[in-house]
Image (cartoon, rainbow, N blue to C red):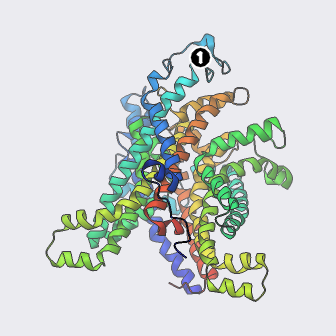
Amino acid sequence: MPDVLPPIKVRRGLSGFVYRHPTIAFGAALLILMLLIALLAPYLGTVDPTALSPAKRTRDPSVEFWFGTDMFGRDVYSRVMYGARVSLTVGFSVAILASLAGLAVGLISGFVRWADGIIMRIMDGMMSIPPILLAVALMALTRASVSNVVTAITVAEFPRVARLVRGVVLSLREQPYVDAAVAAGTRSPMIIMRHILPNTLAPMTVQATYICASAMIVEAILSFIGAGTPPSIPSWGNIMAEGRALWQVKPFIVFFPAVFLSLTVLAVNLLGDGLRDMLDPRMAKRL
Amino acid sequence: MLAHIVRRMVATIPVMAIVALFVFSLLYIAPGDPAAVIAGDQASPEDVEKIRKSLGLDRPFLTRFGEWSWHILQADLGTSMFTGLPVTQLIAQRLEPTLSLMVVTLILAVSIAVPMGVIAAWKAGTWIDRGLMACAVFGFSVPVFVVGYLLAYVFALELDWFPVQGYTPLSAGFGPWLENLVLPAIALGCVYIALIARITRASTLEVLQQDYIRTARSKGMGQSGILFVHALKNAAVPIVTVIGIGVALLIGGAVVTESVFAIPGLGRLTIDAIVRRDYPVIQGIVLLFSFVYVLVNLTVDVLYTLLDPRIRY
């Protein structure tokens, strides 16, 4: 039979990767597009996003103002392009910080047995508070700024990572090779670096992408309700909040940032799904 | 069985205590000086001191926590700094709209998402499956208020099928009450539906590969019977778990949805409190919702034993 079937062509290189993992390719491409927009914002035909010109307020999209103008006469297109910076900054920062914080707490919880019970109870308590409300409560107590938003969302998201890392550490502690390493006298830091970290990398990366997507949405929601980035900085949530008063007559102020935000979050979600399918097919079945 | 339920209920008390401790500590772990932030930029040092006293920041942590917990146990959530009214009264006034929205969304989401997931699992690998799961990914990605505005624009403004904003209490009739809640419920439910559909699909997929499904089919059982009686019942545990966990999404999303559709509920109360930096109100709402969330998850835990008699703690 085998000689009757045609030989399987293995596509190599980038096109092969795209063929086998279309979700990662599409998500990554979209995300890179958004990153380029954020980085190259000043060169994309934009004007100063904070420049007020009341004479030109609430114009519909036209050749001069591609996305129209808002109620202060600011060019919506420029604001949306610059807004990419805030959203992507918040998303990536929260993903990285929450991963690091969760890693640290998870490792401590997994290795130091007497601390495990207390830490996990605290994490459970933290996870019982809906993340947006936690972020809202923290933002109510601090001045509006991008760094405070990042801190607030990180605090809300890192318990999940901690739980994940702790799970990996606990399951690995039972493995024979880790036992052997301990018996041979390997110090804990070496065990962490050689055995624990490589095993946590895959699930943590997948989790980090989901946290990034969630952080971008939470930042938009916080800005939308007035508890997020200060109004002087254009972020997609801010633009939508300002456009809220006029949306029944000039819906484009809300819709353009909405489309960009949705596409970015979609990109990150697709990337996360694709990574999960690629890195651990067993996780994919469990979703 | 009853002993098991009581045991689970007792086990939530430490969790609630920790949640209370954590919510209380937010005041202390916030970076910067919360009293100064709440007082505002134009406040004099005396104003800041007054606020500090009212928040209790001048007294030791433990005494303050003790007093606060004692008040909580007596259902006294503090007094609003802005209106001077007790927080409990403010919450009670706004409870019905939020509760209605959440219940309607829950029922709607579960009735759409579970069949969606089951059908996707049944037709796994076909374009129906891919289509439904693509819808699910979109549901995750589009923020709540965007969906809300979109729905309101298309169905309320353009087509005029539903009212654009507002809320009619249940006492004014079931029809009008439901009419005002349909669009907000769909907007709020999108993420929830996406989540439940994905888990339902994954769980049902695993169950459909079991031998007893093949036995049921060989005994001549109809397709819908197999899917919704045998498969669903066995796949139910992860699905119910996610429904419980997803309530956090409902709570968080309700804040935004109420703003978009001008529903006078707890979400609007939160937003107003944020703008005025009325911290006791925010603290009260966060505490209330967290307790509700813990109770919902307790219900889910108890439901496990009903769904799967093999689960015993």
Q: x and y percent of residue A189 in the render?
A: 19, 64
Position of residue B113 relative to residue B260, above or below, is: below
Position of residue B184 relative to residue B112, above or below, is: above
The three-letter amino acid code for the residue at tag 1 is: Gly
| Front-lying residue, B214 or A10 | A10
Position of residue A136 relative to residue B102, above or below, is: above
| Front-lying residue, A37 or A7 | A7
Q: Quadrant of the N terminus of chain B?
A: bottom right
Q: Residue at x 35, y 67 (%)?
A: A166
Q: Residue at x 40, y 51 (%)?
A: A155
**Residue B291 seen anywhere in this rendered image of the structure:** yes
Position of residue B196 relative to residue A249, above or below, is: below
Q: Residue furthest front?
A: A3
Determine crowd level at label 1: few under 14, some 14-19, many 20+ residues with C-alpha closer than 10 A. Answer: some
Q: Residue at x 44, y 62 (%)?
A: A125
Q: Residue furthest top?
A: A55
**Residue B273 seen anywhere in this rendered image of the structure:** no
Q: Is residue B233 left or right of residue A150?
A: right
Q: Is residue B169 left or right of residue B278?
A: right
Q: Residue at x 31, y 63 (%)?
A: A198
Q: x and y percent of residue B227 in the render?
A: 72, 75
| Front-lying residue, A162 or A265 | A265
Within the image, what quadrant is residue B306 found in? bottom right
Q: Secondary structure at mark 1?
A: loop
| Residue carrying label 1 | A73
Label tally:
1
Q: Chain of mark 1?
A: A
Q: x and y percent of residue B153 in the render?
A: 75, 37
Q: x and y percent of residue B248 in the render?
A: 56, 57
